[in-house]
Image (cartoon, rainbow, N blue to C red):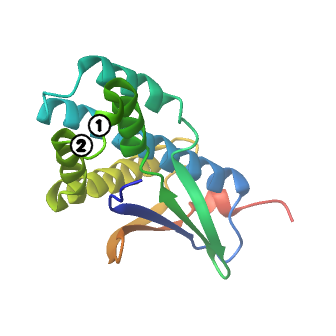
Amino acid sequence: MDEVPHIHIKLQFRSARGVPASVVARILAIAEEEALRVESEDIEELASEIRELPHVAIDAARYRIQQYRGKCFHITSAGQGSIILLGAVAGISYFVLDHTIGDTLGDAWRGSELHRRVLAFLREPIRFRNKYLRLGTYVYRRIGRDAKLRGPTVLLHTTSTRDGVEVVYVITPAEEDKESPQ
């Protein structure tokens, strides 16, 4: 598969008393849902930017990407100290588009001018920057608004990596979430 830049997400939970599993699970669910959202937006942006793409393939890609719900964000490692989870956004939009359009156009797809344009679009630095900033903002806002989380403190920053970008969230759960029966 041709490489497009990667988005890595680092979730760092800070709490002297530990973090309830429900808080970690909820934030992982939010990261997953928003990763699928930005991957789906890739398909919509590509459809409006490259109008020569077959409509049937775009419709099929819209359907197929939904089959990856729950599979868009992969935990790649966990660290000690405060809870640190590292994950990667799976790049599902390119995978789905590549296979869907490949199924529609057959062998003519690979190496075609249209294939080159799709790759160039997905690799374009400003578009990629906007994608990871959207993801960062979506997750940040959802964590802050989520009633189940009761307003944790969240710091957000991004760091460039050799293969893309890392979106870092430093999360301090609300006091009520840290309280647990001993």
Residue 131, x across and y down, in percent: 27, 52
- For the point 39% across and 21% down, the residue is 60
In the picture, the quarter occupied by the C terminus is bottom right
The first of marks 1 and 2 along the sequence is 1
Picture layout, residue 134 above or below residue 166: above
In the rendered image, is residue 115 in sight?
Answer: yes
Residue 119, x across and y down, in percent: 24, 50
Q: Mark 1 packing: few (<14 Cα in 10 Å), some, or many (20+)?
A: some
Residue 111, x across and y down, in percent: 25, 47
**Residue extending farthest bottom:** 81
Per the image, the residue denoted by label 1 is 109
In the rendered image, is residue 149 in sight?
Answer: no
- Closer-to-camera residue (149/133): 133
Residue type (three-letter) at the residue carrying disc 1: Trp
Picture layout, residue 42 above or below residue 176: above
Please state the total of marks drawn on the protein image: 2
Element at badge 2?
A: helix
Cα distance between the residues tagged 1 and 2: 6 Å
Q: Which mark is residue 25?
A: none
- For the point 58% across and 40% down, the residue is 70
Marks 1 and 2 close (CB-CB < 8 Å): yes
**Residue extending farthest front:** 107
> Where on the picture, by quarter, is residue 164?
bottom left
Per the image, the residue denoted by label 2 is 115
Give the side of residue 42 with respect to residue 22, left or right. left
